[in-house]
Amino acid sequence: MSTRPSPPWHGALFTAALFASAAWLLVYTLLSVGPVEALGAWNYVGVVALTLGASIVAAFWRGNFPD
């Protein structure tokens, strides 16, 4: 049984979510940005949510593998 490969935006969504979570963590821990500091420890929940979302997207990726 052959399944079609994932569309190109699937990989882009995974990559964007992964980089966004890393950027969010770096901004929270290294910089003093008002809106980010206002969230306090909830920033970690946001980072974990983005990382978990990226992992779920990656789990459903189907490559172009030969049968």
Image: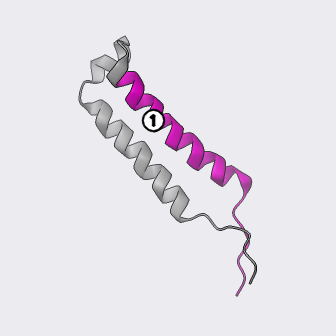
Tell how many labels. Answer: 1
Measured from the top left, where is residue 65 in percent x and y?
72, 74
Name the amino acid, label 1: Ala
Residue 53 lies within the magenta run? no
Q: Residue at x 60, y 63 (%)?
A: 61
Instruction: Give above or below for 39 relative to 20.
Output: above
Which residue sits furthest bottom? 1
**Residue 41 lies in quadrant:** top left
Measured from the top left, where is residue 57 in percent x and y?
53, 57
Q: Residue at x 72, y 82 (%)?
A: 2
Residue 26 lies within the magenta run? yes
Q: Nearer the viewer, residue 26 or 46?
A: 26
Element marked by disc 1 = helix
Q: Residue at x 72, y 58 (%)?
A: 7
* Residue labelled with disc 1: 22
Q: Is residue 67 left or right of residue 30?
A: right
Instruction: Give above or below for 44 relative to 58.
Output: above
Query: What is the magenta range?
Result: 1-28
**Residue 37 lies in quadrant:** top left
**Residue 10 lies in quadrant:** bottom right
